[in-house]
């Protein structure tokens, strides 16, 4: 009773990063940009960039820890302001911000640290914010079978703020809802209010 039941998850069938090929490609990119990758200042840049992209594209594996909901807890569980760092698939530039992940428990509840790991699982990829938001919500729905799921992501996209499409600091907000949080207006409003989103 109350024992955790870790299950090892096979988290991603995504192709791994070929660091050496990435390093060569970054050196080629520097040449294409009119820079000299053999100069003293840039000598180690291709290797560093390759490692940085590898880190941004590789989620850490984790055990999905769930617990039986023995107490019959039936109120919203909300993890607020989970840091999000991802890469926009259109420009390969970062977008970053925060995610709010909530669910209405069914028969099982999720380990407290797990919403952040689920966000990371999908954020460390070439992404668009809408898909990232939906994937986190779908994953929780599929693996936890809660009565409802709500995910909100607020992020600033470097590709937008750099190019002046929007003022720097402007954030894009996306949301994805399942179950009671989608279908019941009061539950939905409670979720958005607790997440700090006016709705
Ligand atoms: Zn972009």
Image (cartoon, rainbow, N blue to C red):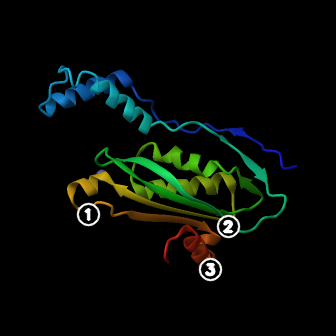
Would you place residue 86 above or below residue 199 in this image?
above
Residue at left offset 77%, top offset 43%: 5
* Between marks 1 and 3 in the image, the one whose residue lies nearer the viewer: 1
1 or 36, which lies in front?
Answer: 36
Q: Position of residue 126 (x, y in %)?
A: 39, 44
Task: For label 3, count other residues whose C-alpha is less than 10 Å away and answer few (under 14), some (14-19) or many (20+).
Answer: few
Q: Are marks 2 and 3 in contact (CB under 8 Å)?
A: no
- Label 1 vs label 3: CA separation? 33 Å
Upstream in the sequence, badge 2 or badge 3?
A: 2
Q: Is residue 54 left or right of residue 43?
A: right
Q: Quadrant of residue 54?
A: top left
Q: Position of residue 184 (x, y in %)?
A: 62, 77
Would you place residue 147 above or below residue 127 in this image?
below
- Label 2 vs label 1: CA separation? 34 Å
Residue at left offset 19%, top offset 30%: 30
Upstream in the sequence, badge 2 or badge 1?
A: 2
Badge 3 residue CB within 8 Å of ligand 1:
no
Q: Quadrant of residue 39?
A: top left
Q: Position of residue 92 (x, y in %)?
A: 31, 44
- Label 2 vs label 3: CA separation? 12 Å
Residue at left offset 57%, top offset 49%: 116
Q: Is residue 2 left or right of residue 7?
A: right
Label placed on residue 76 = 2
Q: Residue farthest to the bottom?
A: 186
Q: Secondary structure at mark 1?
A: loop
Task: For label 1, count other residues whose C-alpha is less than 10 Å away and answer few (under 14), some (14-19) or many (20+).
Answer: some
Question: How many marks can you see?
Answer: 3
Residue located beneath label 3 in the image: 186
Upstream in the sequence, badge 1 or badge 3?
A: 1
Residue located beneath label 1 in the image: 166
């Amino acid at each position: 009773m109350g024992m955790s039941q870790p299950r090892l998850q096979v988290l991603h069938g995504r192709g791994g990063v070929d660091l050496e090929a990435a390093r060569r490609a970054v050196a080629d990119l520097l040449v294409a940009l009119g820079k000299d990758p053999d100069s003293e200042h840039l000598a180690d840049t291709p290797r560093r960039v390759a490692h940085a992209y590898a880190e941004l594209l590789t989620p850490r594996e984790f055990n999905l820890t769930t617990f039986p909901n023995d107490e019959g807890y039936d109120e919203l569980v909300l993890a607020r302001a989970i840091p999000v760092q991802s890469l926009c698939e259109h420009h390969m530039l970062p977008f970053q911000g925060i995610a709010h992940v909530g669910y209405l428990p069914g028969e099982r509840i999720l380990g407290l640290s797990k919403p952040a790991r689920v966000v990371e699982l999908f954020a460390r990829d070439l992404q668009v914010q809408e898909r990232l938001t939906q994937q986190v919500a779908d994953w929780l729905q599929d693996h936890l079978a809660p009565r409802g799921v709500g995910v909100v992501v607020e992020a600033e996209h470097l590709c937008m703020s750099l190019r002046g499409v929007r003022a720097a600091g402007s954030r894009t907000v996306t949301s994805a809802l399942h179950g009671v949080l989608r279908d019941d207006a009061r539950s939905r409003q409670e979720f958005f209010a607790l997440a700090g989103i006016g709705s």
